[in-house]
Image (cartoon, coloured by chain):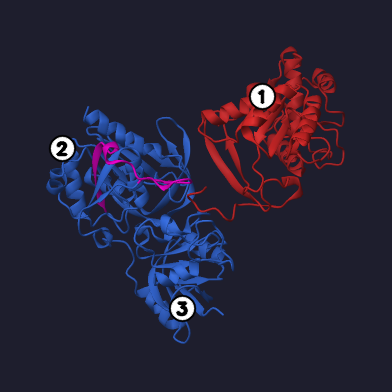
Chain colours: A red, B blue
Amino acid sequence: MPKRTDIKSVMIIGAGPIIIGQACEFEYSGAQACKALKEEGYRIILVNSNPATIMTDPGMADATYIEPITWQTLERIIERERPDALLPTMGGQTALNTALDLAREGVLEKYKVELIGASREAIDKAEDRELFRRAMRSIGLDVPRSAVAHSMEEAVQVQAQIGFPTVIRPSFTMGGSGGGIAYNKEEFAEIVERGLDLSPTSEVLVEECLSGWKEFEMEVVRDRKDNCIIVCSIENFDPMGVHTGDSITVAPAQTLTDKEY
Amino acid sequence: MRKPALLALEDGSVFWGESIGVDGQTVGEVVFNTAMTGYQEILTDPSYTKQIVTLTYPHIGNTGTNDEDEESLGVQAAGLVIRDLPLLAYNWRKQKNLDQYLRDNKTVAIANIDTRRLTRILRDKGSQNGCIMAGDGSIDERRALDAARSFPGLKGMDLAKVVSVTKNYEWTEGSWDLETGHKKPAADDLRYHVVAFDYGVKRNILRMLVDRGCRVTVVPAQTSARDALALKPHGVFLSNGPGDPEPCSYAINAIRDIVDTGTPVFGICLGYQLLSLASGAKTIKMKFGHHGANHPVQDLVTKRVMITSQNHGFAVDEATLPKNLIATHRSLFDGSLQGVRRLDQPAFSFQGHPEASPGPHDIGSLFDCFLKEIKNHHA
C-alpha cells in the first residue's frame, strides 16, 4: 500500500498496565509502531498510563503523555495536539475500547481525527461476541455452539441445548474477565449472575466448552486492498482450558501437518 | 547411534553430518526450500526428481509421515538435507517416523549439518550439483566431490517423460478434509472430463480438479494431441514436473495442436513453461530457482498480492513473449514472470503451485478460472 501523505500526525494509545489479556506483546507492538511511523516522518503523540514501558522512553514519540487512558483524558490531549489520525490497534482491549468511546462521544468527529488501523465497525465486530460469531460463520469458519443471553432466563434456555460443561463469557470485559466454566446448575447460575453484572452491556455468551482441545493461533495481517499474509502460526503448549497467560506458546506450530494448517 | 554422512558440493564445500536414511550415495542438483510445513509433500513431489532438497526450517520430522499426505508413489527427491530430526514425532495421523519412512523409501538423507551455511552458498553461487554419502565405512570426501562434479546438471535434461506414467488412468479422489479424509465424490457429480498430461503430476492438483466436478484421465507425457483429443476432454491440464522444459519437444508440439483446437488449457509449473514454449516464448535456467511456500506474487490485473507455493528452477523469459501471450502474474521477490494467458485461445498457465500442498491456498482460485473456461466453452 502506498504511504498516506494526507496524514501528518498520529496518536497512539498504549495498553496501560501489563495484565492477562493485554500482555507484553502490546508494549512491543506499540514501541515498534512508534519507531516505524516516526521513520516514515509522521509526528507521533503517545498516551500510556504505564510509565514503566519502553514506549514511554523519551525519544520514542514526539509527545508522550503519561495519563489515565480514558476518553475524557484523551479528548483533552486531542484538543491540545490535534492529531490527524488515531491508531488504537497497538494497545490491546483498553485502547480499542477507549477508541470506541471517543467515536461514540463524538470526539473524533469534532476534532476531525481519522481512526486508522481498524474501523469502528471492525472493532465492534471483533469485540462484540455475537457480531464476531456471525462474521466467522459468514466466511465459513466453525465456532463453538453458543448464544447470547441478556437475562438468567435466556441463559438457562441456551444452556439446556448445549449441555455441561458450559463456558460463560461476559461481553466487553478485559480479557473476558468475570466469565468461567460451569459444570453444574449451581455454578452456572452463579457465573451468569456475576457476568451479567460485570458486562457493561449486561450481556453474556453461553458457549460450548472446548476444554482439552489443541490450541493454535494464527497471526494474520490484511490491508485495505485485501492483501493478506499469515505472519506465523502459534501452538499452545497446554490444551484449551489453560489460559494462554498461564502457559507457553511456540511459534511456528510444531505438531500440525500442512493439510491440517 | 546414527551413522555418519557427508554432503559434498561441486564448489568443493563439504558438510559432515549424520545419516537419517539408508546407507549409500546419491547425486543431484542441491536446492533449498523455505517451507515450514509439508516435508512429506515436498519429498514426494515428482518435480524434485534428480534434486537433493535442503529444508531451511530447522526442525523436520515433528509430525512423522502418513499415507494420506503422499503427492505421488513414494519419495521422488534424490535426497534430503536437514538441520534437526526431533527425537519424538507427534501427530494424530502419524504412521511412521520420518527416518523410518526415508529408509522404507530407500532415500539417502543427512541431518545435523549447518543448513544456513549451505543455503547461503546456494543463494550466492546458485544451485550446486552435489552428492550425499551415508553409512559406515565407505564415505570418502574425494569420491563424493568427484560424484558431485560428474553430475551433468538439469539444463537440457528431459525428465518429464522419465517420471510420467506409462498408461492412462482415471482419478476420482477429492481433497483431504479434517473430518472425512480424502473426499470421494459420486460419479454423477463429476460432470466434466479433464485430460491431465502427467509430466510428474502432484496428486493434489488432480484432487482439486475432482473437487470442482472433474473426472480426470491422467495420460503419459508423450501422448499425442490426437490421442488426447480422442478422449473428448472438456479441458486439458498440463502438469508440473521436473527438469528442463526445452527438450520436451513431444509435449510442446502436442500442446500447440491442442491449444489451436480451442480446447480450454490450464498449465502449472512445467506445464506453464511448456504452454509458453508452445506459444513461441523462451525459457531460461534460474540462478537458484524458487522453492518455498511464502512467495508473494502479484496479479497484474487486480494488483492483488497473493502468497504462493513455488518450486521451479527454470523460468519463462518475459522479453520473449509473443503478441498473443500476455503476462498475468509476476513474482515480487525478483520480478520474474509467474503467469501467462493466450489472447486468441482459452489457455492460461501459472508458474507457482495453486494446489499448494504444501503451502498457502491464496491462489487456488485459478482452478475455478479453468472451470469457468470449460463451462464457457461447453455452454
Closest to the observer, A25 or B173? B173
Location of residue B94 with respect to A154 vertically, above or below: below
Query: How far separated are the C-alphas under marks 1 and 2?
Result: 54 Å
Q: Does label 2 lie on the same chain as label 3? A: yes
Residue at x-position 67% and y-position 31%: A159
Q: Amino acid at mark 3?
A: Ala
Query: How far separated are the C-alphas under marks 3 and 2?
Result: 52 Å
Where is residue A104? Give x, y as percent.
73, 16
The numbered mark, 3 or 2, whose residue comes first in the sequence reads 3
- The residue segment tinted magenta is B174-198
- Residue A131 is drawn in which quadrant? top right
Q: Given the image, what chain letter belongs to the residue carrying mark 3? A: B
* Residue at mark 3: B134
Residue at x-position 47% and y-position 60%: B32
Residue A124 numbered mark, or none = 1
- Residue A134 is drawn in which quadrant? top right
Residue at x-position 16% and y-position 41%: B232
* Residue at mark 2: B261
Where is residue A75? Give x, y as percent.
81, 19
Badge 2: few (under 14), some or many (20 or more) residues near its Cα, within 10 Å? Answer: few
Residue A68 numbered mark, or none = none
Q: Amino acid at mark 1?
A: Asp
Front position among marks 1 and 2: 1
